[in-house]
Image (cartoon, helix red, strand yellow):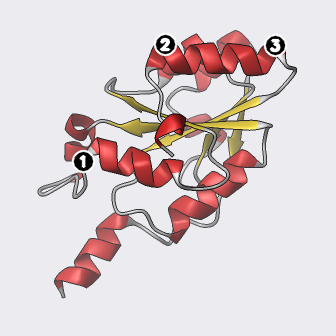
C-alpha cells in the first residue's frame, strides 16, 4: 500500500508513464476522515471511469476546516486507508484550497466528484474544461458522512 502513496513529482511521473502506455486517468479527492461506505462507493465509481485512479487527500490543515476535533486521523493514516482500497492506484496528499493545481499538473481524463456536487458546482470545473477533460458525478446519494458518523458515536 505504501507504494501507492506518492509525492507530487513521483505521481506526475507515474501518470506520464501510464499515459505513454495508453491508459486513461481518473481523479478523485477528499478528506476521507473516518473512511465509510460512502467513500468506498465514491472511489469504486470513480475507478470505473478510467484505467487508473488517482486520489488526492486533503492535508490536516485543510481537513481541520471540517470542524472542531477534525481531522480525527492524520493525513498519512487517511492516505494509507485510501490506498488500501483495491480500485485506487495512486494516492497523494495536497495542501492547496482546491485540487486545481494537481489537475493542471496531471490533466486527468476525468475529474470525479461525489453526488453532493453537480457539474456546475464543481469548484475546479473551469480548470478541467481548460485542458479538455471531463467531469463525472459518481457514487451513491450523499446519505453517509463522517460528521453524522461522529455524531452517532458521541451519542
In terms of image quadrants, where is residue 73? bottom left
Q: Nearer the viewer, residue 123 or 43?
A: 43
Q: Position of residue 60 (x, y in %)?
A: 23, 40
Tell me the SS state at disc 3: helix
Horizontal side of 44 relative to 2 (left or right) equals: right
Q: Check the picture and name the quadrant holding the C terminus.
A: bottom left
- In the displayed orientation, state which residue is furthest to the left: 68
Distance (Cα) linking label 1 and label 2? 22 Å
Marking on residue 74: 1
Q: Position of residue 125 (x, y in %)?
A: 60, 26
Q: Quick one: label 2, few (<14), some, or many (20+) residues within 10 Å?
A: few
Q: Quick one: label 1, few (<14), some, or many (20+) residues within 10 Å?
A: some
| Residue bearing mark 3 | 20
- Residue occupying image coordinates x 18% and y 54%: 67
Q: Tell whether label 2 touches label 1 (CB within 8 Å).
A: no
In terms of image quadrants, where is residue 35? bottom left
- Residue occupying image coordinates x 60% and y 19%: 126
Horizontal side of 72 relative to 105 (left or right) equals: left
| Residue bearing mark 2 | 9
Distance (Cα) linking label 1 and label 3? 34 Å
The correct choice, above or below, for 8 with respect to 37 in the image is: above
The correct choice, above or below, for 86 with respect to 34 in the image is: above
Label located before the other in sequence (2 or 3): 2
Amino acid at each position: 500500500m505504501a507504494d501507492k502513496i506518492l509525492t507530487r513529482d513521483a505521481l506526475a511521473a507515474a501518470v506520464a508513464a501510464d499515459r505513454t502506455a495508453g491508459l486513461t486517468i481518473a481523479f478523485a479527492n477528499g478528506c476521507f476522515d473516518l473512511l465509510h461506505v460512502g467513500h468506498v462507493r465514491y472511489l469504486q465509481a470513480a475507478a470505473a471511469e478510467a484505467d487508473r485512479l488517482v486520489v488526492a487527500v486533503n492535508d490536516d490543515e485543510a481537513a481541520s476546516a471540517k470542524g472542531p476535533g477534525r481531522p480525527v486521523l492524520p493525513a498519512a493514516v487517511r492516505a494509507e486507508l485510501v490506498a488500501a482500497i483495491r480500485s485506487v492506484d495512486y494516492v497523494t496528499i495536497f495542501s492547496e484550497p482546491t485540487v486545481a493545481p494537481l489537475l493542471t499538473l496531471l490533466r486527468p481524463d476525468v475529474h470525479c466528484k461525489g453526488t453532493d456536487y453537480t457539474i456546475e458546482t464543481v469548484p475546479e470545473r473551469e480548470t478541467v474544461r481548460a485542458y479538455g477533460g471531463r467531469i463525472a458525478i459518481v457514487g451513491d446519494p450523499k446519505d453517509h458522512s463522517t460528521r453524522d458518523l461522529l455524531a452517532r458515536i458521541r451519542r
